[in-house]
Amino acid sequence: MTQHFLTTEAVQQLTQSLGQSLAAFAPEMVLAGGVVLLLLLRLFSAFNRVHLGYIGLGLAAVALWLSWTQWQSFMAADNTSQLSAFSGMLVWDGLTAFVRLFLMAALLLLTCLTLMTGIPDREDSADFFVLLFGAVLGMCLMASANHLLMIFIAVEMASLPSYALAGFLKGRRQSSEAALKYVVYGGAAAGVMLYGISLIAGRFGTGYLPDVAASFLTVLKSGSFDPLLLVAVMLILIGFAFKLSAVPFHFWCPDVFEGAAAEVGAFLSVASKGAAVALTARFCLTLVGGVPDGGVATAELWRTASHYFGPALAFFAAVTATFGNLAAYTQTNLKRLLAYSTIAHAGILIMGLAALTADGLAAALLYLLVYLIGNVGAFAVVAFLRNEYGSEDLADYRGMVRRAPLLTVSMAIFLLSLVGLPPLAGYIAKFEIFAELYRAGTGLDRPHLIYLLVIGLLNTVISLFYYVKVLKVMIIEPLPEGAAVKPIAPLANVYVGLLAAATVLGVLVWDPLMEHGARRSVAPFRFAEQRLQSTVK
């Protein structure tokens, strides 16, 4: 019987591969080390007198700096390459680098917000930031997952800490109820997704995403219809839809946002969306042969495969955006209103993915950046006003412009940017998504995208009504008699003012953000798209 042993050369190759993988995922290593460090500090009573959020702030800044450095180096080098890491379980490419930079920026912004609002307090700071760092670590892995098993592990790593964060307000019934609903819906979605993963792995004998894509295209090439494969893909997409809070898997979102702290709502509304968009895009574009090692798709096969995903994504995008905007109009609690707004924006993001092109993904990435600033800013205003006036109901914000003029003006900027009105940053994000829907719908002969464009424009008009309703209450309606006017903390005004300034000035960096940022980050996904366009021409 022959025995095989690792040779010195093989050990050196493994060591070199592991070193490259660890270097590529240095920001994730900072997050993992931060979790361990905070847990260890929790054991020493001396640190009970210190708010460990400041340590979390330092770690978040280091992770952001590493992410920025790596993204810059990737953009300066061959930005079409993909580095397989950790034996192919993860992949490091432009999409990974961009979304990780987005997540680290969100982590830093939210850490600063929590330190200013006092949630969590000193006693619970270690637990809170362990959960926050753990969730962001899982979301980073979602963006880079290259294996079906890693997809499931990453989604669960992101979800489990999020459940605890939703119920972090101790002694508050709504918070506990929000966490329970989140757990129930999340567990059901995870089970459904895992069943779909098991079906695909059993059908093709592999979970490695490029190999799955090659097998999927082989099935399409044979011309046979495989209902098992269709069901499996649908079940996996259900798990992604839960993270995106897409209709009809959105039921957890309004209750969780209302019961959780505004700071947690801000985190879930932006970070979770960014990771889910990256994961959905990587899965769908790889499966239809959109990357060099994702199969041997011809132009005809790419068109056939895209018809499996494109119309379905377009349908759910239209339903999600429309439902979110219509439901938001009747809300009286600001966090609940912003929750339905989050659902509507998930629909807009899916519209970018529905094009199944690299430029559609680039437009969605730009939208994420703009959405990060606007949504964090809106939730920050709610958090600061809650601290001063003890309410999150819209009726209690009447005449708020006389109580907190800078916060009110900033809120107006954030909400109008979320509508997509020029010249605010939200306009450039929606313009890019709608422009790509038009280009893909006409240039690639996919008329359903033109219908989706019309629905997107109508939803933009609908969203204006409930955003303006908030501004009407805060600016036009009179201040209640005898209402107290309390001073807003200077740091709160500075934080919100900087985000509002970024929203106003964002249009000035439109071209660098889109051309030299988002589009260059999705270069590896132009493989099949370029081939199809050359065939059409």
Image (cartoon, helix red, strand yellow):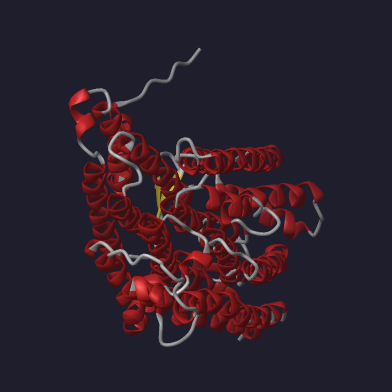
Question: What is the quadrant of residue 452 in the picture?
Answer: bottom right
Q: Residue at x 62, y 85 (%)?
A: 443
Q: Quadrant of residue 10?
A: top left
Q: From the viewer's side, name the closer residue of 129 and 358.
A: 129
Is 267 placed left or right of 239 in the picture?
left
Is 301 displayed left or right of 344 in the figure? right
Is residue 479 something that shows in the picture?
Answer: yes
Please state the horizontal and vertical placement of residue 9, each as a whole percent of the image. 29, 32
Number of marks in picture: 0
* Residue 13 showing in the rendered view: no
Residue occupying the point 27% across, 40% down = 19
188 versus 396 height, above or below: above
Q: Nearer the viewer, residue 529 or 470?
A: 470
Q: Residue at x 68, y 63 (%)?
A: 309
Question: In the depicted view, which residue is nearer to us: 145 or 426?
Answer: 426
Left/right of residue 293 with respect to residue 323 in the rendered view: left
- x, y percentage for residue 2? 47, 16
Vertical placement of 276 versus 325: above or below? above
Query: Residue 326 placed where, x, y %?
Result: 67, 71
Q: Image quarter for residue 64?
A: bottom left
Q: Residue furthest left?
A: 46
